[in-house]
Amino acid sequence: MSPGPGDELPAVDLRSDTVTRPTPAMRRAMAEAEVGDDTLGDDPTVRALEARVAELLGKEAALFFPSGVMANQTALAVQARWGSEVVVEGGAHVFHFEEGAASALKGLQLHPVPTPDGVLRPEHLDAAVRPGSRYLPRTSLVCIENTHLASGGRVIEPDQVRALAEAAHARDLPVHMDGARLWHAAAASGRPLTDYAEPVDTVMVCLSKGLGAPVGSLLAGPAEVLEEAWRVRRRFGGGMRQSGILAAAGLHALEHHLPDLPETHARTLRLAAAFDALPGFRVVPPETNVLLVDLEPGGPDPTEFLNFLRFDRILMLDFGPRRLRAVLHRDVDSPAMARVLDSLARWGRQAGAA
Ligand SMILES: *Cc1c(COP(=O)(O)O)cnc(C)c1O
């Protein structure tokens, strides 16, 4: 095969917002971080990051984890009882993308509730929470996701979070929020992070979902819950030592990259408009940095389209039957956006000429 014209260009990688690389300034912050043995409680940079995130979310404490999956699963392990059920929204990351961890590691049964928009509402709990019969499993936790990835990065608004949390608490069920992209919800709505986090018991946030840090997630919540989470993190092999080098990247991201999210969201809207102008493409209107694009029946072939983009060194994900996904992030700058828009325009001209 002959090489494409763009083979020398770096790829515009829209597969996920996890593909960002640390900036030179972030690498400097990492190199210069003051560190200690975090398992002995001695790493000042980790402690500073945990305090900062607890403050941002309005929680008593926060704990630094090597991944979002480990932090989510720790939240489940600490708050849900062995052999019981956790009610989750049907498209949830904890259900689809965490390698069956809740059942494999903690003997939990996830009870997925399909919703049209990713929003778990009080009436869903009426149907999903078990009534307390000895012939049915017990429900012990409710889990929501914000922003909701499978519905296209949708924001669950604070009043929706509160309504759900109140309905769960009325049944004595704690609520965990998978807030891998909670930063995006707050940036999109202009509401403080605390408005989203306050109604729920525990919150997980990722530093590598659009914020540009290479590693790291945190679990925030009551100090007593996090004391137990510390043990479970250790049990899962997630206790770290001089992890201040990683925490420094997180602190840098919170200070310098958090303010850039609205720009990323504006680019997502621009990309959505460009797709919507093409015949045969329909976008799910984006609210944050995730764009889902549906290909109409009888319209463009997904593989052919993805290959067309790949020839221009632009990467998107195949996200299900006739659905594509693009996730915008800070490494997609203006020139990269221009390349994507140019490719889409060329596809449009080619389709129009055919
Ligand atoms: C990325 C992500 C996680 C955590 O996944 P990691 O692979 O551990 O980073 C959890 N929930 C959602 C919704 C995510 O997008």
Image (cartoon, rainbow, N blue to C red):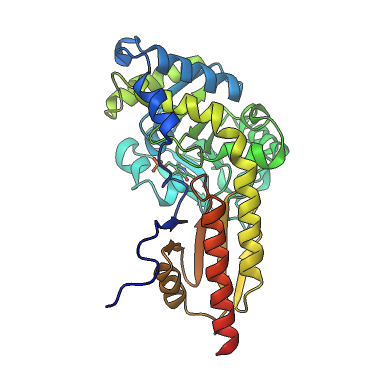
Whether residue 253 is visible, yes or no, is yes
Please name the residue shown 50% across and 51% down the image: 112
Q: How many numbered circles does the render carry?
A: 0
Quarter-of-image position of residue 272: bottom right
- Ligand 1's quadrant is top left
Q: Position of residue 341 (x, y in %)?
A: 58, 65
| Screen quadrant of the N terminus | bottom left
Q: Position of residue 210 (x, y in %)?
A: 51, 42
Whether residue 175 is visible, yes or no, is no
Comparing 126 with 327, the one in front is: 327
Comparing 236 with 185, the one in front is: 185
Q: Position of residue 43 (x, y in %)?
A: 36, 13
Quarter-of-image position of residue 83: top left
Please name the residue shown 47% across and 71% down the image: 321
| Screen quadrant of the C terminus | bottom right
Horizontally, residue 159 falls left or right of residue 224, namely: right
Horizontally, residue 221 falls left or right of residue 47, namely: right
Tell me: residue 89, above or below residue 168: below
Q: Position of residue 305 (x, y in %)?
A: 47, 74
Please name the residue shown 47% across and 79% down the image: 301
Tell me: residue 197, above or below residue 126: above
Quarter-of-image position of residue 78: top left
Horizontally, residue 10 falls left or right of residue 297, namely: left
